Image (cartoon, rainbow, N blue to C red):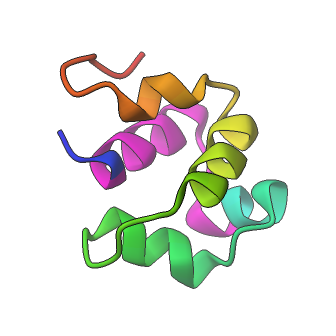
Amino acid sequence: MTIGEKIKQYREKKGFSQTKLSDISGVPQSTISTIEIKSKAPDIYILNKLANALGIELNDLLKEKQEAR
């Protein structure tokens, strides 16, 4: 599972739209969309903001084989 797929899975589990995640995290919605469709590799600063907004640990996004909660 890619980082983008994990972000989408956690986002949907929380019931967040990309717009709501953007509002909470401060990451532009267009960036979230691009990350989720795998056409942009996010930097660690963006990943940390998204993890915080989703209420998860950064490692939850970085671990290769960990299943999303």
The part of the chain drawn in magenta is 4-19
Q: Horizontal and vertical percent for residue 15?
A: 59, 41
The number of numbered discs placed on residues in the rendered structure image is 0
Q: Quadrant of the C terminus?
A: top left
**Location of residue 29 with respect to 12 vertically, above or below:** below
Q: Is residue 7 magenta?
A: yes
Residue plotted at (47% across, 42% down): 12
Q: Is residue 24 magenta?
A: no
From this viewpoint, which residue is outermost toward the front?
Answer: 44
**Location of residue 48 with respect to 66 vertically, above or below:** below
- The image quarter containing residue 62 is top left
Residue plotted at (39% across, 77% down): 34
Majority SS type along the magenta span: helix
- The image quarter containing residue 52 is top right
Q: Is residue 13 left or right of residue 4?
A: right
**Location of residue 11 with respect to 17 vertically, above or below:** above
From this viewpoint, which residue is outermost toward the bottom?
Answer: 30
Query: In this orientation, which residue lies closer to the viewer: 34 or 62?
Result: 62
Q: Is residue 59 left or right of residue 48?
A: left
**Location of residue 35 with respect to 13 vertically, above or below:** below
Residue plotted at (27% across, 18% down): 67
Residue plotted at (65% across, 44% down): 48
Q: Horizontal and vertical percent for residue 58?
A: 56, 31
Q: Quadrant of the N terminus?
A: top left
Q: Horizontal and vertical percent for residue 64?
A: 22, 28
- The image quarter containing residue 6 is top left
